[in-house]
Image (cartoon, coloured by chain):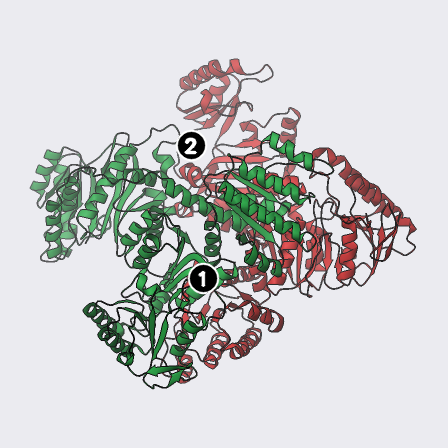
Chain colours: A red, B green
Amino acid sequence: MKGFFYPKSIVVIGVSDKPKNMGRMIVYNLIHKGFTGQVHAVGPHGGTVLGRPVRKNVKDIQFPLDMAVILTPAAIAVEMVRECGEAGIRRIVIESAGFSEFSDDRKGLEEELSAIAKEFGIRFIGPNCIGVFNTDNGLATSFVLTTSDFGKGDVSIVAQSGGMAMTYMESLEFNGVNFNKVTSIGNKLNVDESDLLDYLVNEDERTRIICMYLEGIKNGRRLMQIARQSKKPIIVHKSGVGRAGAATAASHTAAMSTDNRVVNAAFRQAGIIRVHMTSQMVDFVKIFELPPMKGRNLAIVSRSGGHAVIAADTAEHFGFEFPSFPPEELAKINEHVRGGVINLRNPLDLGDLFDLSVYESIARMVLSNENMHGMVLAHAYGKADREESRQFLRVVKELSIKYQKPVALCLMIDDQEASYLKQNIRFPFFNSPEEGAWALSASYQAHQYRQREQVTVSPVGTFDPLPARTIIENAAQERRNPSQAECFDILKLYDIPVPGYRQAGTAGEAIEAAEQIGFPVVLKIDVPSVLHKSDVGGVVLNLASPKAVSEAFTQMHDKIAGSLSADEPFVVLVMEHVKVTGQEVIFGIKQDQTFGPALLFGMGGILAELIKDISILIAPVGRSEVNEMIRRIKGYKVLTGVRGQKSVDIDSLADNLLKLSQLALDVPQIMEIDLNPVLSYEDGCLALDARFVL
Amino acid sequence: MKGFFYPKSIVVIGVSDKPKNMGRMIVYNLIHKGFTGQVHAVGPHGGTVLGRPVRKNVKDIQFPLDMAVILTPAAIAVEMVRECGEAGIRRIVIESAGFSEFSDDRKGLEEELSAIAKEFGIRFIGPNCIGVFNTDNGLATSFVLTTSDFGKGDVSIVAQSGGMAMTYMESLEFNGVNFNKVTSIGNKLNVDESDLLDYLVNEDERTRIICMYLEGIKNGRRLMQIARQSKKPIIVHKSGVGRAGAATAASHTAAMSTDNRVVNAAFRQAGIIRVHMTSQMVDFVKIFELPPMKGRNLAIVSRSGGHAVIAADTAEHFGFEFPSFPPEELAKINEHVRGGVINLRNPLDLGDLFDLSVYESIARMVLSNENMHGMVLAHAYGKADREESRQFLRVVKELSIKYQKPVALCLMIDDQEASYLKQNIRFPFFNSPEEGAWALSASYQAHQYRQREQVTVSPVGTFDPLPARTIIENAAQERRNPSQAECFDILKLYDIPVPGYRQAGTAGEAIEAAEQIGFPVVLKIDVPSVLHKSDVGGVVLNLASPKAVSEAFTQMHDKIAGSLSADEPFVVLVMEHVKVTGQEVIFGIKQDQTFGPALLFGMGGILAELIKDISILIAPVGRSEVNEMIRRIKGYKVLTGVRGQKSVDIDSLADNLLKLSQLALDVPQIMEIDLNPVLSYEDGCLALDARFVL
C-alpha cells in the first residue's frame, strides 16, 4: 500500500483545458498542495494545462511513472488501465464513476478492470472515488478544489465516500486536528478497507489514530483480525443501516448491507469503536490525541455550575465515578482562596472563584492524584483574563502529558480565541462538557479492550466434520434443507444434547420407535418442505401408548400426505416427550456474507418476541467471550434464578454454544441454524427443535 | 414580567472602581450593548465609574427607577432589597450568590428576601444569576464581559445557570440564529421558569421560539399547563438527571431532583421537546425557524452519496418515509441533464451532476409536490461554484417559504462562506445531514402534538372522596400506613375491583370470613409494619376448608405475633383465592413533589423485573392518554394476545387506571400506591394486592 502514498511521480489521465475538466483540477491540487514528486498529464486533446504539456498517451511520457490517477468515462478508464499496465505502472487510482454503483449492467466493466489488474499485477484504488491524500508529501488527488491548507498530523482516514472523506478532513482541520493520510476507496474493487487498515496499523509509523467511514464491509473477518491486534485506536462510522440507507449505499458505492447487529457484535469483539455521527467521530479523535483514560474515576471541574451538572449527568451515564478530593489537598488549596472557602467537592463548581492560580493548583491536585484517572475541565473566558487563561491552559497541557491522564477541555470562548488556541496551544478542546465526557468514555472503553485478557479459542471437543458435511451435501444435492432427524444427527455428531428421536414412515415404525425411546412421545411431521409444522397439524404431544401413537400417525398422514409432492415421502419424527422444567433459550447461527458465521444466543418465549433479547458473537469464539455473551442478555437474571428459583446450568449453555460455533465453522454450507427452543435446566440443556437452512 | 425586560431606568447596586469589581462590569455591558434607558450606579465607596457618579444610597438618585440589579455579598443584598423597596423599586435582579445553593444555613437569608419582597410587592429574579438580556433595547445585566454583538432575533432563553445562558447565546449567535430575550434565573426564589414561560408564551409578541435550561422544576403542573396551550415551540434541556448531576445541581442552584422518567412523561404530555445536549438544542432551534414538517414524507437530495446514506439512516430511524418522485416530473428534469440520465430515486445522490440549475428544478419539484412534507438538502461547494450556489440557496429559501415546508440544509463549506451565509442568506443550515434529519423529527413531533385531539379529562365516575380521606387521616394520625384491608376499602370506594376479603383477629373470625367469602381462600398477615409478608411466612394460599384456615391462622400467629409491638394487634386478611387466569400488570401512583400525582402502568412478573416496562402519565389524565399509555409498553403485544391467546380487557384496564388517577387527585396525602399485581383477564381486571404509603 505504501506505493499509493509515497509515489515519486504521478500521471493524471483525463486532463484537458476545458473549464469544467476535472482531471485538470487534480493536477491543480497536486501542484498547489506542494506535492514533492513529479506530475504528468495525459488527455486525448493534448495541449497544455497549468503550464504543463498534456500527452496523448501514457507511453509518450519518457520518465518512470510510479502511479496513475484516472478520471475519464468508465469505459475509457478500463482502456487506460491497460495502457498503464503496458507502461509498467502498478499503482492506479481510478476516480471515474459509472460502474456497478450506477447499474448492474456495468459489472462487466468491473470484471474487465479486475482481469487487467491481475494480468499486470496492478493494485488499484476505486473506481468511483476521490483518491488519496498525504500531508507528508503534499499528495492530493481530489478533483474537488480543496482550499484549506492542511497541517501535518497523525490521524489517517479511510472513507468509502469521497464526500465523507472531505467532510472528515475539513471537520478535523476546523477542530484543530491535522490528518496524515486520507483514502477515498469508492467501490473498492481491488484495494479495500482491510488492505489499507493493515498498512495503517502495521506499517505506517506516521499514523497514530485511524478513522473509517464505511457503507459496506468487504472482508469482515480480515478487518476484525487486523483490528484485534491493533495498538492504534480504530474508529468506524458505519452507515447504510436502515432499509433506505442501505439501498442508497448500494447505488452510491455498490455497498452490500450486513445485519447491523452483526456489525455491532463484530466491532465490539475486535475493539473497533463505532460512531454514528460526524461530530462524534471528531470528538473521539480529539480524545485519542490525549493520554488514555485508564479507569473510571473522573474529576469534573467547571467555572460554571451548569456545565458541571451536564458533565456529571453524561459521565455518570457512561459509568464514571467521582471520588472526593483528599481533605489535606483541599486544605492546601483553600489557603490560597481569597476571601473565604469554596465547596471543593467533586464535581466541582468553581463558582465565584476567579483566581486562575487556584485553578492551576486544583488541576495539579487532580492530575497528580493516583486515584484520579482523568478530568473534564470546563472553562470560559473573555478578553479580561485571556492571558492568564492561556497560561493556565498551557499548564493543563503540561500536566496532562506529565501525568499521562486525559483532560477533556471544554471551552466557552469566542472564534478568534479558538483559532489562536488551535494554532498555538495545540491541545484539543470540546464545544460542550457532555461531548467531552462522552469522548472520555470512548477512551476508557478502548483502554479496557487493550487490557482485556487475550481471548483464546481452544477446541471444546474433537469432532470429525466429515459425517456432518456428508449429510449436508446430500441434502444440498437434493436441493432441500435437512430434515429434523438429519439436524439432530448433526447436533449429536457435535455432542449437542437432543431428546431421543427416530424417524418413522409407517404407523408400525412409529410404534416401534416409541417403544425404543420410551413413552410418552411426540410425533412431528419431518418433511423439509413443511415449514410451519403446527399450523398443518403436524405436531402431536404427549402420546403415552402404542395405540395413541398409531392413531396420531394415521390422522397426521391423512391430513398432510396428500399435499406433499410425489418425490416427498411422508415421514414423521418420533421424539421423546421431555418433561424436565427449565427456561427456554434460543441458539442460532447465521452465516453473514462478510463476517462469516455469527453465533446467536437469546431468551426464548415472550422475551424473544417482545424485546429481541439476543446477543451475538462472530465465530470462532473463546469461552470467556461466550460467558460474557450469556451474561449480556437481559434475561440473564431469569437464567440465574429469580424469585427463589435455582439457576440453570450456565456452563452447559456455554459448552454447547461453543460446539455449535465449531459446527458452523466446520460446515459453512449451513447458512442458518435455529435451535428454538433449547431447554436449559439445572444440570444441562437440551435442543428441543432444530432447523437448518442451506 | 414585562417590567424586567423593558425598564426605562436601571440602578446597578454594588459598583466600585476596583479593577475586579463585577458591578462595574454590569454598567459597562449596559452601556456597550446600547441599552436605551438610563443607567445609574450605587456602591459604598462612591466615586465615579465609566464616567458616571456612584451614589452611596439608592435614595440619593433623584430619578424614577424601574429596576435594580444587585451584586453584593449575600447579606448586604438583603439590605439592598429593602432599600430598593423603600425607594419604590418593584423589579429587582439579584445576582449575588451565597444563598441556599452555598449552604443550608443560608436559607434564613432567602426567607428574609421573600419576606421583604412580599412586604413591598417586589418581584425579583435570582439570587445567584446573571440576570436579563433583551436585544430589543440593549438590556444586558451580565457581570461577565460579553464581547459579541448580538443581533435581534425571535428566540428567547430561560436558563437556570448563567454559564448555560451564555453558552446558548453564543452557540446560537455562532450558528447565525439571533435571540430576543434571555433570563438567567438562578435559585428562582421569586420569579421562576413558569412565570417567564407564561410571559414569553402568552404576552411577548417578540418571542417565537422558547429554549430553557433547567436543573430543577419548581411548579411542574403550572409549567405543563402553560406549555400545553402554547403555540410556540418550547425546547427544554433538563439536567441534574444522575445522582452526581443532581447533587451538583443542588449546590449550584439549590435545584431539587425529580424522577427523570416523570420529567419525560410530563414533557411528552405537555408537548415540551426535551434535549440532552447543547448542540441538539441549537439544531432544534434552527429547525423551528423554518416552516413545520407536517408529515412523514421526506425527500433527501445530496451532492455526495455518503451524506445521502447518513441522512437516510437517521431519517428512517426517526420514522420518516421516502416516497418516489413522480415519473413525469423526473422526465422533465432529465431533459435538462447534460450528457445522460441520472438515477432520480429518493434518497437522491446527485453524483456527477454538477449543473446547479438542475438542482433548482429538483428542489422545486420536491417542494411543490403535495405528497412531500420536507427535505434534507446536502450541498458542498467551493470557490468555483460559489456564486451559483449562493443563488441556488436563495431559491431554496424562497421555495421553503412559498410552499411552507422545511428544508434541512446541510452545507460543507469553508468558514468564510459560512459567515457570509449567516449574514446574507439568513436561512439556517446544519453541519451534518444526520443533525438536519434529527431536527426535522423534532419539527414533525411538535406538529403532531399541535394536531392532536384535545385531551378531555372527563370523570370516569362520581366518587365521594370523603370516606377515603377519613380512612387515610386515621392512619396518618396513628403514624402508620393503611392496612391492606383499608387499601381495599378505598379501592372499592373508587369502584376498582378487588377480590372478596375480610379482616380477622382470631381463628374463629378467619373461618367465619372464609365461609362468607367462599373457599378456597388466602390468608395474609395484615399489620402495616410487616412489609415483606411472604418472607416472614405471612401468606398462605389455597386454603380449602375451615380446618385448613384455622391451622394456617394458628401457625401464622405463632410465627409472627411475638415480634409485633404492643400496640399492634395480630390481624390477618382473609381473601378470595382467585383462580381466573390472565396477565399480571402493575398499577401505581407516585406523588412527585413538582408534577403532582404520576400514574404508572406496566407489565408485572418477569418483564417488570428485567426491563422496567413502565409508562407514566401525570394526572389528571384523559381516556385517550390512558389508552396510549397502555399501548406504549413493550408488553402490550402480550396483553392483546400472543400465540393464539385472547386479548385481555384493555378497556377495563383503562377504566380502572382513570379511577386510580382520580383517587390520587382526591387524596393527595397518599404518596405512593402500588397495586402489584393487577390480574388482567378476558373480561375485566382485579387488584390482587395493594400497598399505600403516606
What residue does disc 2 label? A578
Few, some or many residues within 10 Å of mark 1 (<14, 14–19, 20+)? many
Q: Residues within 10 Å of mark 2 (few under 14, many from 20)?
A: some
Name the mark on residue B168.
1
Query: Circle 2 sits in a helix, a strand or a loop, which is it?
Result: loop
Name the residue rendered at 25%, 45% in the picture: B620
Q: Name which residue type carries label 1.
A: Tyr
| Residue situated in front as seen by the camera: B525 or A471 | B525
What amino acid is labelled 2 in the image?
Val
Measured as percent of width and height from the top left, residue A593 is found at 63, 40
- Whether B655 is drawn above or below A570: the answer is below
Task: Mark 2 vs mark 1: give the one in front.
Answer: 1
Question: In the rendered image, which quarter contains the C terminus of chain B?
Answer: bottom left
- Look at the image and tell me whether residue A541 can be seen: yes
Please state the chain letter of the residue tagged with numbered disc 2 in the rendered image: A
Q: Quadrant of the N terminus of chain B?
A: bottom left
Q: Nearer the viewer, residue B214 or B518?
A: B214
Residue B611 position (above or below residue B200): above
Q: Is residue B551 above or below residue A354?
A: above
Say which chain tag 1 marks.
B
Q: Are marks 2 and 1 in contact (CB under 8 Å)?
A: no
